[in-house]
Image (cartoon, helix red, strand yellow):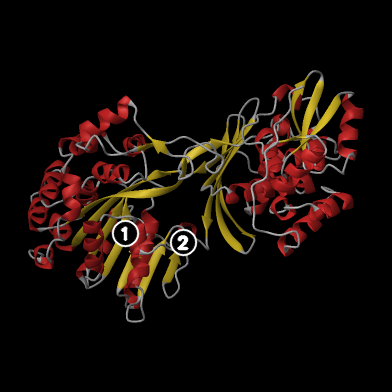
């Protein structure tokens, strides 16, 4: 008969009277994972301390003692057909996970051998023969969430609740969204989704209605990932959306127009600000929630991940008394985090720093921060104009969106203020021409702009599972960008720690362009961004793609990741100058005289 193999315990220095081992056995006894007889036998057995170092080791010992199977559930995939034979609510309640059917017997993973009522209930309901297989509680919970979906127990209980009516989007009568949205099960389900997303480090939650399903996705490390949910979730779509609206202080009766709101939640002493957007779609209302962690620690300058030359240049620019520093890139590329790190670097009692943002993503101690409120008339331009009357030394403008804001920012820099802001452009040279296109006079741009940083985020390879990449495409890549063929680069594999993606966390790549005399002259001549790029390259600028190749050489990311966030033009520059990126890191920073000369 096939069953899961048991593995021998690893030796340990802990003895049978180790206090940690005693606490573990006491907890497992209380949870009905062990009997009193098992505890006595385990503590009296030679080397018992080795078996009592973790729940998995104790369960492995118990499986050998009673001739049962044991699994860590790492390489075991439950049979979906077998799983569908059992009510999800009962499986979650009793922490039971059906795995597979062998010779007419269904193997069921459990961590509680001495709580047989769950298995007995399943036997009575299905009439099937069941055999317990021991597995750690944490592993069972992890796999249940993966195979049964988030909130499966909640949805199961909702189906059995007669008081909740299924809401028909096309009919107004016979529905009570207020009551449905305030039902305890709906509240619990929405809370479960929020908690799950926060624990998985998601930046966004997407609730998407389709004709035959209600899909939930999390954006983790910049990539959307499907969340397993119960198949019957579609029935409760209107109540779930209404619950989110109630939390966001939105009008639940309004289904025809987009609405924006905000939720603030606290989970285990961590505050999370959630920006909510609701838009009516063909099959109901779609919801996107952006999660902003208020307690996220600010990184230091060295933790930004810049190459040594760029880091030295950035630190020098921060000490300038006036001028504009721009950070460019698409939404979600880490621009605000870079600017906050810069502000944190120069934040002291000798400077007054004021910011105007939409939204305020981090709260910085000692920094005066303003939240844009367009409904009340507080725009970037109006707020910036008022900020100048508060005698600031440093100003951060969340985004330059229009001509008025751009002009006030330029004037502020020319009157003795150091101004930081962001723009949505594809690269650093494009920021110069964007300001001119907005209507700012070229001589003002040339006089005020000090540096532009373009940045993107690439996913970081999971350190638990990354492997050297010796494939033909990897070898071709090394030859194309000028890397020595004996350079080791890595590929993504996937494991439990990274949710089988092969990546965990993200790292920034940068394109630093300092405004020197040659670039200032080109701005005055209204030169194109291509001409400005060529001048910046002559001055030592490293492109986004080249900085990405640096991370590939260091084993931080893959070349596919760099290609996914850079343009064909950047890649062409990088491949034509494959050896220049390495030389650029060793190049000394430009002298202050060359950066400051020629200002108007």
Q: Which mark, by number, is residue 223?
A: none
Quarter holding residue 450? bottom left
In the rendered view of the protein, which quadrant contains the N terminus?
top right
Q: Is residue 133 left or right of residue 13?
A: right
**Label 1 to label 2, Cα distance in Å?**
14 Å
Residue 131 position in % (x across, y down): 82, 30
Of marks 1 and 2, which one's residue comes earlier in the chain? 2
Asked whether residue 183 is in view, the answer is no
Q: Which mark, by number, is residue 421?
A: 1
Residue 335 position in % (x across, y down): 36, 54
Return the residue found at the far front: 46
Q: Is residue 40 left or right of residue 203?
A: right
Q: Residues within 10 Å of mark 1 (few under 14, many from 20)?
A: many
- The secondary element bearing badge 2 is classed as loop
Q: Residue at x 73, y 58 (%)?
A: 21
Q: Is residue 237 left or right of residue 303?
A: right
In the rendered view of the protein, which quadrant contains the C terminus?
bottom left
Q: Residue at x 55, y 39 (%)?
A: 499
Relative vertical location of residue 559 with respect to residue 101 in this rendering, above or below: below
Quarter holding residue 146? top right
**Front in this rendered view, residue 362 or 475:** 475
Q: Which residue is mark 2?
A: 360
Asked whether residue 496 is in view, the answer is yes
Q: Residue at x 19, y 47 (%)?
A: 582
């Amino acid at each position: 008969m096939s069953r899961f193999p048991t593995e021998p315990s690893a030796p340990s220095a802990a003895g049978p009277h180790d206090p940690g081992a005693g606490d573990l056995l006491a907890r497992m006894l209380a949870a009905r994972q062990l009997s009193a007889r098992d505890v006595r036998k385990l503590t009296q057995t030679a080397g018992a301390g080795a078996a009592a170092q973790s729940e998995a080791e104790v369960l492995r010992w118990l499986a050998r003692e009673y001739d049962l199977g044991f699994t860590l559930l790492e390489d075991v995939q439950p049979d979906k057909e077998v799983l569908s034979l059992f009510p999800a609510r009962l499986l979650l309640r009793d922490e039971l996970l059906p795995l597979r059917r062998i010779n007419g017997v269904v193997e069921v993973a459990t961590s509680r051998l001495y709580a047989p009522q769950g298995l007995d209930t399943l036997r009575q309901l299905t009439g099937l023969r069941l055999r317990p297989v021991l597995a750690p509680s944490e592993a069972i919970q992890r796999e249940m969430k993966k195979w049964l979906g988030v909130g499966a127990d909640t949805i199961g209980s909702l189906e059995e609740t007669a008081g909740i009516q299924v809401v028909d989007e096309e009919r107004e009568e016979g529905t009570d969204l207020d009551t449905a949205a305030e039902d305890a099960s709906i509240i619990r389900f929405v809370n479960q989704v929020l908690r799950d997303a926060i624990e998985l480090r998601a930046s966004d939650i997407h609730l998407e209605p389709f004709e035959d399903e209600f899909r939930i996705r999390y954006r983790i490390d910049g990539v959307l990932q499907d969340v397993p949910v119960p198949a019957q979730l579609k029935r409760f779509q209107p109540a779930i959306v209404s619950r989110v609206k109630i939390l966001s202080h939105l009008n639940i009766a309004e289904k025809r127009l987009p609405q924006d709101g905000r939720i603030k939640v606290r989970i285990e002493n961590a505050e999370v600000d959630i920006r909510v957007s609701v838009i009516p779609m063909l099959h109901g209302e779609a919801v996107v929630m952006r999660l902003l962690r208020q307690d996220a620690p600010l990184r230091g300058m060295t933790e930004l991940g810049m190459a040594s030359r760029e880091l030295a240049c950035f630190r020098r620019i921060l000490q300038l008394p006036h001028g504009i520093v721009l950070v460019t890139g698409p939404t979600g590329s880490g621009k605000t985090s870079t600017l906050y790190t810069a502000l944190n670097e120069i934040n002291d009692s000798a400077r007054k720093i004021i910011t105007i943002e939409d939204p305020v993503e981090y709260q910085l101690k000692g920094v005066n921060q303003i939240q844009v409120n367009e409904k009340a008339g507080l725009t970037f331009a109006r707020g910036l104009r008022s900020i100048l009357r508060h005698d600031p030394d440093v100003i951060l403008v969340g985004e330059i969106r229009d001509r008025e804001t751009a002009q006030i920012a330029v004037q502020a820099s020319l009157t003795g203020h150091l101004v930081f802001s962001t723009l949505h452009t594809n690269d650093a040279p494009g920021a110069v021409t964007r300001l001119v296109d907005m209507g700012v006079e070229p001589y003002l741009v040339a006089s005020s702009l000090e540096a532009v940083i373009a940045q993107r985020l690439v996913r970081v390879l999971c350190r638990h599972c990354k492997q050297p990449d010796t494939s033909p495409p990897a070898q071709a890549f090394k030859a194309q960008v000028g890397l020595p063929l004996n350079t080791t680069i890595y590929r993504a594999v996937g494991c439990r720690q990274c949710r089988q993606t092969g990546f965990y966390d993200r790292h920034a790549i940068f394109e630093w362009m300092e405004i020197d005399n040659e670039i200032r002259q080109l701005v005055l001549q209204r030169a194109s961004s291509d001409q400005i790029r060529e001048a910046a390259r002559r001055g030592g600028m490293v492109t986004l793609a080249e900085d990405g190749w640096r991370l590939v050489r260091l084993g931080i990311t893959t070349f596919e990741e760099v290609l996914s966030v850079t343009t064909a033009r950047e890649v062409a520059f990088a491949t034509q100058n494959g050896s220049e990126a390495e030389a650029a890191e060793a190049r000394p920073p430009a002298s202050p005289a060359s950066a400051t000369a020629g200002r108007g």
